Amino acid sequence: MAARLLEVYLDLLSQPCRAIHILLGCTNIPHTVRTVALRKGENRTPEFTKLNPMQKVPVMVDNGFVLTESDAIMKYLATRYDVPQHWYPRQPERRARVDEYTAWHHTNTRPHAARVFLLEVLVPQQTGSPVDEGRLVRALSQLEETLDRLEAMFLRRQPFLCGDDITVADLLAVCELMQPEMSGRDVLQQRPALQRWRSRVQAAVGEAFHRAHAVLYAVRDRRAAKL
């Protein structure tokens, strides 16, 4: 029987792509990474558009089965392949906790952390205009409200967002909250409980975390050198 062919199309400057990259690195699922450089417009080529008409990463192709959206991809991988159950638990209540966070993530952690990155890094880079400080202050305030809820609703007094073990929810969240680091901003600097959570996530995934974030760190360091 021929081996399964799993391909993932990623740009590691993308938060959800990094989450998938870490999951694959931790679970040792055989795969091939196809890099799609968003900054070069490679997501708009005819070949990539056939895979994903929305022209977005990530995309997964597993033996001809094409899937988009990071949440769906990570849960598929954790279900389809022989990986430790803690990533996406089979027990209904524990799985529901992961689903609860990931549903909340897409209208809270993701857009609010991403907005800080967009205002502080992407918009000035693309337009050559200075940072709109007023809009940035409002975005940071909104992110602080989200972090309050992240601590109170999900982390509480447990080690990880959904319980005692790391799950795909932690990967999605931590990669999103790392994105403002591209400008040198640590959004968890004044939040010791979330800092400890981030350290636990990093310890749990080991070198996979640093491999996924190497491009982000390089961009951050180049920006710092220009200041």
Image (tube, rainbow, N blue to C red):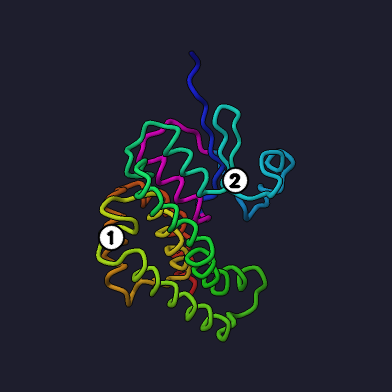
Q: What type of secondary structure mainly makes up the magenta span?
A: helix
Q: Mark 2 points at which residue?
A: 36
Amino acid type, label 2:
Val
Query: What SS does tag 2 mark?
Result: loop
Contact? badges 2 and 1 (CB < 8 Å):
no
The span picked out in magenta is 13-33
Within-10-Å neighbours for mark 1: few <14, some 14–19, many 20+: few
User: What residue is shown at x 61% (from left), y 73% (from top)?
Assistant: 124
Instruction: Inspect the magenta stretch and tell me whether residue 34 lies in it.
Output: no
Residue nearer the viewer, 77 or 176: 77
Q: What element carries label 1?
A: helix
Asked whether 196 or 150 is in front, the reply is 150
Work out whether 194 lies above or below 96. Answer: below
Of callouts 2 and 1, the N-terminal one? 2
**Residue, x 52% and y 49% (percent of image)?**
70
- Residue 53, quarter of picture: top right
User: Which mark is on residue 219?
Assistant: none
Give the residue drawn at x 50%, y 49%.
71
